[in-house]
Amino acid sequence: MPESARVEVVIRGVVQGVGYRYFTRQEATRLGVNGWVANRPDGAVDVVAEGDRAILDELLDRLAVGPPGAVVRDVDVAWRDATGAFREFGVRAGGHSGD
């Protein structure tokens, strides 16, 4: 049985104004994980995603590259227990604002 997990990620670099949030939503939806992505005021991007741990690892690989035009310099990852709080993957206006 797949291991369900939650990953909380902060991506830094040139990741705003290059379609990074929409790229993230597309990849997460393609992989079948739920959660959200949002720009941060400091120029970074927050991602919270839940799903199968192996699939989340695949999402992290994609986030480390990003869309054309992005320059990912740092990916800060924190693993947590899945909460089941999400039913889809969405784009939020900004900031880490809880679930």
Image (cartoon, helix red, strand yellow):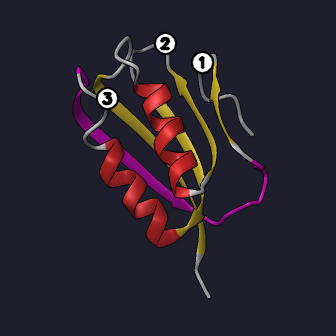
In this view, the residue in front, 3 or 99, is: 3
Residue type (three-letter) at the residue carrying disc 1: Gly
Identify the mark nearer the N-term, 2 or 1. Answer: 2
In this view, the residue in front, 94 or 26, is: 26
Label 2 or label 1, whichever lies nearer to me, is 1
Q: Residue at x 31, y 29 (%)?
A: 12
Which residue is most to the bottom?
Answer: 1
In this view, the residue in front, 45 or 30, is: 30
Query: Mark on residue 94?
Result: 1
Q: Quadrant of the C terminus?
A: top right
Please state the horizontal and vertical placement of residue 92, each as a whole percent of the image: 64, 24
How far is mark 2 from mark 3, CA to CA?
A: 12 Å
Please state the horizontal and vertical placement of residue 83, each as a whole percent of the image: 74, 60
Q: Which residues are magenta?
A: 69-87
Q: Residue at x 46, y 44 (%)?
A: 27
Q: Residue at x 37, y 52 (%)?
A: 60
Query: Mark on residue 54?
Result: none
Q: Is residue 7 left or right of residue 69?
A: right
Query: Mark on residue 12?
Result: 3
| Circles 2 and 1: CB atoms closer than 8 Å | yes
Residue type (three-letter) at the residue carrying disc 2: Pro
Query: Mark on residue 41?
Result: 2
On screen, residue 63 above or below 67? below
Identify the mark nearer the N-term, 2 or 3. Answer: 3
